[in-house]
Image (cartoon, grey):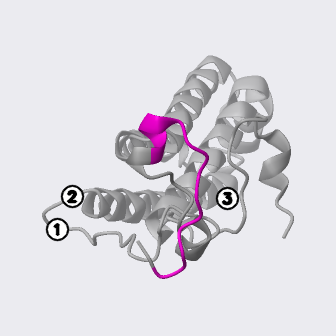
């Protein structure tokens, strides 16, 4: 079976023969999705703050939106890192800032009142997802409470144990420099 990952492996690296189950849990996949979402949103806030402020009736607050964009990108990068729990809690804190900022703009004099309300609902939904992901990741990585991963199906031998039996030379042959002798099947 052909695997694309073999194309980028160095000449001396072992080749991928077959793949097994992914070690990523649903919490890991949710955290990864939220991390990429955070980076995308932060990029928009950083490079197009005028569009964001115009859509929400917040003209003149572009610097604040750019700062929020940098915060989003940093939280997204942390969420994609091995310490995703810190990134997710950073996202939750950022959601709190976003909610407070949007609530300040939720006034009847704002011509974009409906847009601000829609943004608040979206931020609220994302906050729920961030909280679920943070709790699941924290539980998953807590050795006292989390579900332990099972590696019982892995042998470390991609071609199976039968293919490696007899491949090692006995110690006596190594010391004497003699040519390897095949070991009969069934002998370990």
Which residue is at the front of the view, 22 or 173? 173
Q: Earlier in the sequence, mark 3 or mark 1?
A: 3
Q: Left or right: where does residue 186 sit relative to residue 122? A: left
Residue marked by disc 2: 142
Q: Left or right: where does residue 10 sit relative to residue 63? A: right
Q: CA distance from mark 2 to mark 1?
A: 6 Å
Q: Quadrant of the N terminus?
A: bottom right
Q: Is residue 106 above or below residue 133?
A: above
Q: Nearer the viewer, mark 3 or mark 2?
A: 2
Residue name at image x 86 percent, y 45 percent? 7
Instruction: Give how far across and how far down residue 87 sits, in percent.
Output: 42, 40
Residue name at image x 53 percent, y 36 percent? 177
Is 142 part of what is drawn in magenta? no
Which residue is at the front of the view, 185 or 49? 185
Q: Cβ–Cβ below 8 Å for labels 2 and 1?
A: yes
- Magenta stretch secondary structure, dominant: loop
Q: Residues within 10 Å of mark 1 (few under 14, many from 20)?
A: few
Q: Which residues are magenta?
A: 173-186
Rendered image quadrant of residue 43 = top right
Residue name at image x 57 percent, y 65 percent? 164
Q: Nearer the viewer, mark 3 or mark 1?
A: 1
Instruction: Give how far across and how far down residue 57 sits, in percent.
Output: 69, 39
Q: Does residue 100 show up?
A: no
Q: Which residue in the rendered view is the most extreme toward the bottom?
A: 186
Q: CA distance from mark 3 to mark 1?
A: 44 Å
Which residue is at the front of the view, 116 or 34? 34
Instruction: Give how far across and how far down residue 187 sits, in percent.
Output: 44, 76
Q: Is residue 164 above or below residue 80?
A: below
**Local SS, label 2:** loop
Residue marked by disc 3: 114
Residue marked by disc 1: 145
Q: Which residue in the rendered view is the most extreme toward the top?
A: 63
């Amino acid at each position: 079976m052909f695997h694309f990952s073999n194309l980028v492996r160095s000449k001396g690296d072992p080749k991928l023969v077959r793949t097994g189950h992914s070690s990523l849990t649903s919490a890991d996949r949710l955290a990864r999705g939220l991390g990429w979402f955070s980076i995308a949103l932060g990029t928009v806030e950083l490079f197009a703050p005028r569009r964001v402020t115009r859509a929400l009736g917040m003209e003149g607050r572009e610097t604040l939106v750019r700062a929020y964009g940098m915060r989003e990108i940093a939280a997204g990068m942390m969420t994609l890192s091995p310490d995703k729990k810190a990134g997710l809690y950073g996202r939750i804190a950022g959601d709190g800032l976003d909610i407070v900022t949007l609530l300040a703009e939720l006034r009847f004099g704002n011509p974009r009142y409906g847009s601000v309300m829609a943004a608040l609902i979206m931020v609220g939904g994302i906050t729920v997802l961030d909280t679920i992901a943070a709790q699941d990741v924290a539980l998953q990585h807590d050795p006292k409470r989390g579900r332990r991963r099972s590696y019982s199906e892995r042998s470390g031998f991609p071609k199976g144990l039968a293919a490696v039996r007899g491949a090692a030379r006995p110690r006596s042959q190594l010391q004497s420099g003699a040519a390897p002798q095949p070991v009969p099947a069934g002998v370990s």
